[in-house]
Amino acid sequence: MKTVAIVGASLAGARAAQELRAQGFDGRVVLVGEEPHLPYDRPPLSKGFLAGTASRESLDLLDDDDLAALELRLGTRAERLDPATGRLVLSDGELAADGIVLATGGRPRTLPGTESVAGVHVLRTLDDALALQQELVAGARIVVVGGGFIGAEVASTCRALGLEVTVLEALETPLARILGPQLAEACARLHDRHGTTLRCGAAVAGLDTVADGAGQRVTGVRLGSGETLPADVVVVGIGMVPATGWLSGSGLENAGGVHTTAGLVTDLPNVVAVGDVAAYTSAETGRRCRHEHWTNASEQAPVAVANLLAGQPVREYTPSGYLWSDQYAGTLQLAGHPEPGDEIVFTEGTVEDDAFAATFRREGRTTAVFALNLPRAFTRLRRQELRRPAPVG
Amino acid sequence: MLRACTVDELPLGESVRIAGPEPIAVFNADGELYAISDTCSHQDASLADGWLEGCFVECPLHAALFDLRTGVPSCLPAKKPVRTYPVHVEDGVIYVRTEAAEVAA
């Protein structure tokens, strides 16, 4: 193998580039990124970077040594993959590669028809964060649509900036699908405690706008109930869609993400997929899985690269299921694979406390561990109760 | 020089955090005492809350692993070392010599 092209220059792509070198690949590595920016870490975009406390440099994923070992093609969009020749058609030319890593991530879901309305934001990229940051000015009324991790983090950052924030959540309790109702309820209370208005079971019917130059600017959010909430800024955090459109005609199955084996290899043996875009078949359950978390992107790269370089399946991906979220100066941490109906056993504190740790139990075994504001207890629980996760990187 | 705690307050496998402008974490790793900068060089996390294994500590947030002897990370996501500080014990009290901090090249 002489040339490996990595399509997508965020965490999964950057880690794949580092892994190729770490695993001894000495050929050409080309990292293709649609954004013009050097690869950066996204989690701070809703937290420290948005608040203005974390610098752009602190987000850098690759250092000078990493960058010297690869070719960067930034500001370059991948448009087509020709499976017969392994040729990539890029927005600025073609690229021939013997190995390809697909790490294109996804695009945030939007409220249909509101994409060009001023004051309406999504948050996935550095440019998204910069655009939102500009509008977080004193007195701005913020409505966050979606009470998931990104919505909650944006809300907490806005509160720290002293802004008035309302979070609209479609479910009865945000995060209930991940944490179950009891723990999700405890996390939801953080909003109230820190002065954010949380409205659950809320459906967005549309936006009120006024003419603003040549376009429109948001002034309010209309709810299904008929009520309108005044809003100067609306942040939409309602999930993402895997970026696979450019793969039509490649022959790769890509409904709901690029389909891969448990080793993250696609239908083409020299093409692997990592990160938010990879829909792999779980070796354990046989189910197709796709995860949208930092740790997943980070942990998948070494597995996919090992299989790509070996030319055959030598490793399978077993996710640690670790995720964290920083909200209101606190930290939520989850590891493992909780399922609906798991019994929750508190090991420290209770849901009434600001800090607690708990395990999810099913049929006598621990399926997951969770902690709010207790990182030390979390680390111990995770080590004691769960299989040791595969080392990252 | 900073007072950390008494020897009795830091049993095997435990750690203590000294607050300050640059917080310091002191570990008792199998009887050896080590002091390093408490803040992970990757992102804001307290290494005193991490998992101690041999003379390595794993960051509680993103599992970066640091060698307590040198401060050098041995795996991603951290790439930069954390400071290390000499530790000494006098009359049953653990002290950290902050003026003698070192950063591995």
Image (spheres, coloured by chain):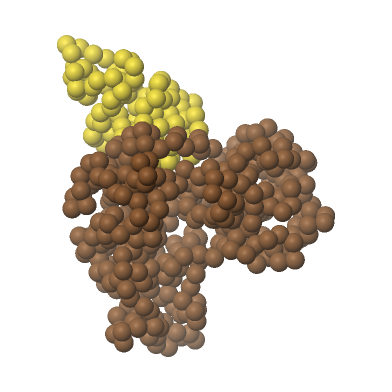
Chain colours: A brown, B yellow
For the C terminus of chain A, the image quarter is top right
Tell me where residue A138 appears, x and y as whole percent: 28, 69
- What residue is drawn where x is 68% and y is 32%? A24
Q: How many discs mark residues in the rendered view?
A: 0
Viewer-proximal residue, B41 or A156? A156
> Is residue A163 among what the camera can see?
yes
Left or right? Give the position of B38 relative to A1: left
Viewer-proximal residue, A330 or A199? A199
- What residue is drawn where x is 20% and y is 60%? A193
- What residue is drawn where x is 30% and y is 37%? A376
Tell me where residue B97 appears, x and y as whole percent: 28, 20
- What residue is drawn where x is 68% and y is 40%? A313
Outermost residue on the top side: it is B91
Tell me where residue B14 appears, x and y as whole percent: 28, 25
Image quadrant where residue A220 sits? bottom left
> Is residue A20 among what the camera can see?
no
- Position of residue A197 relative to residue B88, above or below, is below
Left or right? Give the position of A306 relative to A194: right
Outermost residue on the front side: it is A363
